[in-house]
């Protein structure tokens, strides 16, 4: 009896795995088409510098404009793009769009902002990435400080033998890194010092329960203090409430990003939002 149950269980998983593999193939095919048809759109979420009361940069966040399913969240397709290797091409389309849109925005703002683009593990192991970035910046006539690359701790630590030379080549170009979802993975603090890391983005999970959660607040204070000593910027992600903003300001976390100020927006809505944020910061 146990044996037949075992067999059934095996068959069940095997069928499930088959369905999963089929689904993966379907999405892969759709993603390929979407890359050819340029069906991805890049949205921008403002990053606000509290002491100077201004939007100073934008995080680029990709969406898939699916012909039948509407806007699809990156959480749904980035992992598949990564698994299939299509992320390298998709990542280039995002980088291209982000630079183009940043130039457009900076031409219309009375000061200069930067753009932060997320990178996946495969992109960071692509030996052609530094040359691609160098060429990209020169095509848009963008100084390297206007582009920031966001990588998570696990992306950073994954197969470092492959990514380290690429990271150093990126450093040579003058492009800086931001550690995304900081605090949720494992990163060696010594790498933060050795690599061209410019900022730590404190994960939303530490911000969410402020002001209720004392432990989260202690973690944020400690990370902010450490970052200050290491000469790193700290960005708080997922700021939704005024109380959170107040705490972050007091704690010395000067850069914030979240729905409190704005969700990610299509390029054409960004300028009006920067203006609205400036007004909001006057009070
Ligand atoms: P992430 O880089 O950590 O981006 C922050 C996510 O938090 C975004 O979700 C953003 O919309 C969301 N968010 C921002 N403020 C708030 C807030 O106040 N409250 C809440 N609840 N959420 C907030 P999104 O756009 O769905 O992106 C999800 C993830 O997908 C990103 O997390 C990033 O890891 C990945 N991703 C997005 N675009 C790209 C891309 O172009 N390339 C790569 N490799 N990954 C990307
Ligand atoms: Mg990010
Ligand atoms: Mg993040
Ligand atoms: Mg995240």
Image (tube, rainbow, N blue to C red):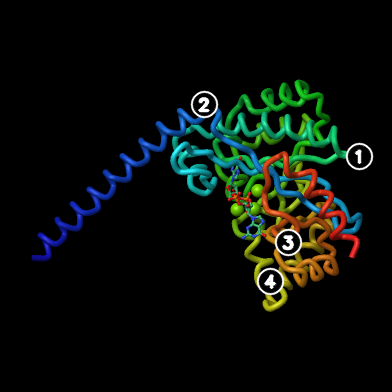
Q: Which residue is mark 1?
A: 110
10 Å neighbourhood of mark 2: few (<14), some, or many (≥20)?
few
Q: 116 and 41: which one is in front?
A: 41
Question: With 12 as the anchor, is 210 left or right in this view?
Answer: right
Secondary element at tag 1: loop
Give residue 191's position: percent from left, percent from top: 70, 48
Q: Residue at x 80, y 56 (%)?
A: 255
Which residue appears farthest toward the left when viewing the image?
1
Q: Residue at x 72, y 21 (%)?
A: 135
Give residue 14's position: percent from left, percent from top: 23, 48
Q: Which residue is mark 4?
A: 216
Calculate the distance from the C-alpha at mark 3 to the C-alpha at mark 2. 34 Å
Q: Earlier in the sequence, mark 4 or mark 3?
A: 4
Q: Earlier in the sequence, mark 3 or mark 2?
A: 2
Calculate the distance from the C-alpha at mark 1 to the C-alpha at mark 3. 24 Å
Calculate the distance from the C-alpha at mark 2 to the C-alpha at mark 4. 44 Å
Q: Which residue is mark 2?
A: 37
Secondary element at tag 3: loop
Q: Earlier in the sequence, mark 1 or mark 4?
A: 1
Calculate the distance from the C-alpha at mark 4 to the C-alpha at mark 3. 19 Å
Q: Quadrant of the C terminus?
A: bottom right
Question: With 237 as the anchor, is 29 left or right in this view?
Answer: left
Secondary element at tag 4: helix
Residue 165 appears in the figure: no
Q: Earlier in the sequence, mark 1 or mark 3?
A: 1
Determine the image quadrant of residue 207: bottom right
Q: Which residue is mark 3?
A: 260
10 Å neighbourhood of mark 1: few (<14), some, or many (≥20)?
few
Q: Is mark 3 within 8 Å of ligand 1?
A: yes
Determine the image quadrant of residue 102: top right
């Amino acid at each position: 009896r146990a044996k037949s149950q075992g067999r059934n269980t095996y068959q069940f998983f095997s069928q499930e795995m088959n369905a999963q593999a089929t689904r993966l193939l379907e999405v892969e095919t759709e993603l390929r088409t979407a890359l050819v048809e340029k069906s991805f759109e890049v949205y921008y979420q403002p990053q606000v510098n509290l002491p100077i009361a201004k939007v100073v940069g934008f995080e680029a966040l990709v969406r898939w404009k699916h012909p039948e399913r509407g806007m699809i969240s990156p959480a749904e397709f980035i992992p598949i793009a990564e698994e299939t290797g299509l992320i390298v091409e998709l990542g280039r389309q995002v980088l291209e769009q982000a630079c183009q849109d940043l130039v457009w925005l900076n031409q219309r703002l009375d000061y200069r902002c930067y753009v932060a683009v997320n990178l996946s593990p495969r992109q960071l192991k692509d030996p052609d990435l530094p040359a691609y970035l160098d060429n990209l910046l020169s095509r848009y006539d963008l100084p390297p400080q206007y582009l920031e690359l966001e990588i998570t701790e696990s992306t950073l630590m994954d197969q470092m033998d492959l990514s380290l030379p690429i990271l150093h080549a990126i450093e040579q170009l003058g492009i800086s890194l931001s550690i995304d979802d900081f605090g949720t993975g494992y990163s060696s603090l010594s790498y933060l010092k050795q690599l061209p890391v410019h900022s730590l983005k404190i994960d939303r999970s530490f911000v969410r329960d402020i002001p209720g959660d004392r432990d989260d607040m202690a973690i944020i204070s400690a990370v902010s203090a450490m970052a200050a000593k290491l000469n790193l910027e700290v960005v708080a992600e997922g700021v939704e409430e005024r109380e959170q903003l107040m705490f972050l300001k007091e704690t010395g976390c000067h850069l914030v990003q979240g729905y409190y100020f704005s969700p990610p927006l299509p390029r054409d809505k960004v300028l009006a939002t920067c203006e609205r944020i400036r007004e909001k910061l006057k009070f």
